[in-house]
C-alpha cells in the first residue's frame, strides 16, 4: 500500500482519476459514469427585450458625446450597425 501511494500522482484530482480508471478496468465500478450536467436558467426572451428597452430609455440613461463613444457591431444578417455608448443615471 505504501508503494502504491508513493507511485501515485501528488495532485489529489489526478490521484482520484487514476484510481477511478483502475477501478473501471478491474470492473469494480461501472465504466459509464454520468457527469453532472450544469443547467442554465435563462430569462425569457420577452423579459430580456423589456430590460434592454428599459435601460435604453432617455430618462434612465444618456448618450455619451464624442466620436470615440460609438460601438459598431454586425447583426445576424451581416449588416453593421453603429450605436453610441450610454451611461445609466442612478
Image (spheres, rainbow, N blue to C red):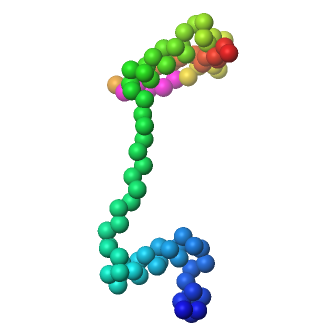
Residue 37 in view: yes
What residue sits 60% from the left and 18% below the top? 85
Q: Residue at x 57, y 80 (%)?
A: 9
Question: Can you give x and y, in whole percent of width and height, for residue 59 in the image?
Answer: 60, 6
The quadrant in which residue 57 appears is top right
Could you tell me which residue is drawn at 39 percent across and 52 percent down?
37
Q: Residue at x 44, y 23 (%)?
A: 48
- The location of residue 74, given as percent across then percent down, is 44, 26
Q: Is residue 75 magenta?
A: yes
Q: How many marks?
A: 0
Q: Position of residue 3 (x, y in %)?
A: 57, 93
Judged by its main secondary structure, the magenta piece is strand
Furthest residue toward top? 59
Task: Give the quarter of the image for residue 28.
Answer: bottom left
- Is residue 65 placed above or below 9 in the rendered structure? above
Where's the C terminus, which quadrant?
A: top right
Question: In this picture, is 75 found above or below 59?
Answer: below
Residue 80 at least partly seen: no
Q: Does the magenta portion include 35?
A: no
| Pick the front one: 87 or 30 | 30
Query: Which quadrant would the N terminus be assigned to in this image?
Result: bottom right
Residue extending furthest toward the front: 28
Left or right of 72, for residue 61: right
For the record, the magenta segment spans 72-76
* The one of 82 and 5 positioned closer to us in this rendering: 5
Horizontal arrangement in the rendering, residue 30 relative to residue 41 (left or right) = left
Amino acid at each position: 500500500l505504501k508503494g502504491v501511494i508513493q507511485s501515485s500522482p501528488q495532485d489529489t484530482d489526478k490521484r482520484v482519476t487514476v484510481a477511478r480508471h483502475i477501478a473501471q478496468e478491474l470492473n469494480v465500478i461501472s465504466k459509464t459514469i454520468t457527469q453532472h450536467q450544469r443547467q442554465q436558467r435563462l430569462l425569457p426572451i420577452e423579459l430580456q427585450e423589456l430590460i434592454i428597452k428599459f435601460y435604453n430609455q432617455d430618462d434612465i440613461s444618456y448618450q455619451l458625446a464624442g466620436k470615440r463613444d460609438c460601438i459598431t457591431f454586425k447583426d445576424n444578417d451581416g449588416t453593421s450597425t453603429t450605436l453610441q455608448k450610454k451611461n445609466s443615471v442612478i
